[in-house]
Amino acid sequence: MTTLSSNKSPSNRLAVLLTVLGLASPLGQGHEVELSLSVPNAPFHVLGDPVPLHWEFLNRGDRRLAFMWEGCCRLNGRVTASLGQTTLQSESMTSTAQLAAHRFARAARLIPGQPTVFETNLSDWLNIDRSGDYLLAARYTGLLDNQQPNVTPGWQLWRHSANSKPVEATLLTPLDYVAKRTKLNHKSGLALGFIKSKKWKPIDGAQFDLTFKNQSVQPMSLAWPSAFGIWILGPNGRRVPLTPTQIKSAPEELTIEPDGLLKKNVLIGGGALDSKPFGVYRIFVDYKAGDHRSPSNMVDIDWRLGQAQLIELLHAASLGAKTGLRNKPLKLLRLHIASLGLALDQMNFTKLDANERKLLEELQLAAKLKPFGPKPGWVTLKLSIAKDGTLQFIDQALGQALPIKGSIVEKLRSIASIRRHLGWVLAVELQPKSGVTQERAAEAIESLKILQPQLAKPPVLTTN
């Protein structure tokens, strides 16, 4: 039991009490906590891989410490990467939701003399797009002024900062990695050849031939397909997020004699790129086993929808979905409707049947309307009510995008009929102009009742 001396000042007595209860103010010695960074030892790391970045905290003091660990929002931590005269520094996120989420989050603990390690990825902190030998360093602040973690008695709050010593890491862009394939193939003894055997098609994707040549003087055993991965690069040369990385094939052990050659088929489905912007993509296969790593050559994929492919998709989409399945061709057309306006307008009607023509007309209108609600979700169509009760679109450009003939109600019905192509949830808002009577406003609302089954809610009357 600790006794408070009566000859201490009130402020000192309060400090001692807070210490006993484990609620003391910030530590006076920031160097009680040491921070070190580490990256897995390897000749190089390829940007686009999840390069692990380990944070090790060591409490050198004799008091148990509590602090806020966050490896996702870059609030307490900072990472710098130096390459020659260039230095990149991570930037903290500033959204209100993230700040609030970390304010009262559960605290991490540092026990005296016991290392505590957290693992993040380098890409969580920095966006590096240049090859080179980097020096990586970090700074971490235990608690920010607005963070108040829940701690039990007996734990000190660490509010100071710790700096790590720089660590070296060789980073290669995917393009520079593939450019070194001859040298890497010689080191690993394995040369990969990647050939496109079939043209890329929507839905189906493409088929490739992957050849394995043993350039060493010893037999080689390869774990297929677990030792191999797919890399898809965008027009900017970076790995495309959320694309397949694994080769789908039955696992087996491949044995290749010296100077021997094997071949495997690799299928990459159209789903790998169906939601990605049109453009030229590059694909290669990466071999990684132990200390050995080498890439294949790259193959270009021209991802776009020409007239012939559009006709095929329209035909397949007009037939509807198969039992228990979604209509993949229609989904693909909807995903890219914003980019297909001109191509759809140039379609030859004579090559289409009645169902295909109807679908084409719907998609043509959807392409014209897409700019007025680029993202799927809630879209409110605003109309004005004139003194005589007539309705007009407040956004004149929207009205001009619709067919010239027909009443406002018919035009609204045409929008409602293709809303699923746009992913829209429709609502209508009426704004009476000056001098419009309640009777005229009621008549306007009544005229739109026919549309209510296709609207998310009944039309509403508002004022400017």
Image (spheres, helix red, strand yellow):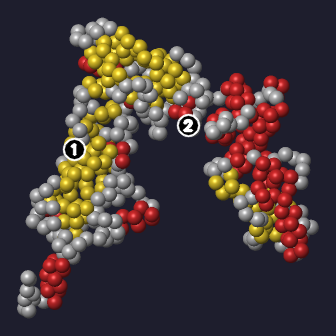
Residue drawn at x 16%, y 89% as measured from the top left: 10
- Which quadrant of the structure image shows residue 87? top left
Answer with left or right where residue 158 lies relative to residue 9.
right
Residue drawn at x 83%, y 32% as measured from the top left: 354
Type of amino acid at the residue the image marks with label 2: Lys
Is residue 270 among what the camera can see?
yes
Query: Residue 266 location, x and y as percent?
Result: 46, 22
Disc number for residue 276: 2
The N terminus - image quarter: bottom left
Type of amino acid at the residue the image marks with label 1: Ser
Question: 138 or 46: nearer the eye?
Answer: 46
Answer with left or right where residue 371 lies relative to residue 105.
right
Between the residue at mark 2 and the residue at mark 1, the CA separation in whole angstroms equals 35 Å
For residue 315, above or below residue 422: above
Residue drawn at x 21%, y 58% as measured from the top left: 162
The C terminus - image quarter: bottom right
Question: 128 or 148: nearer the eye?
Answer: 148
Disc number for residue 38: 1
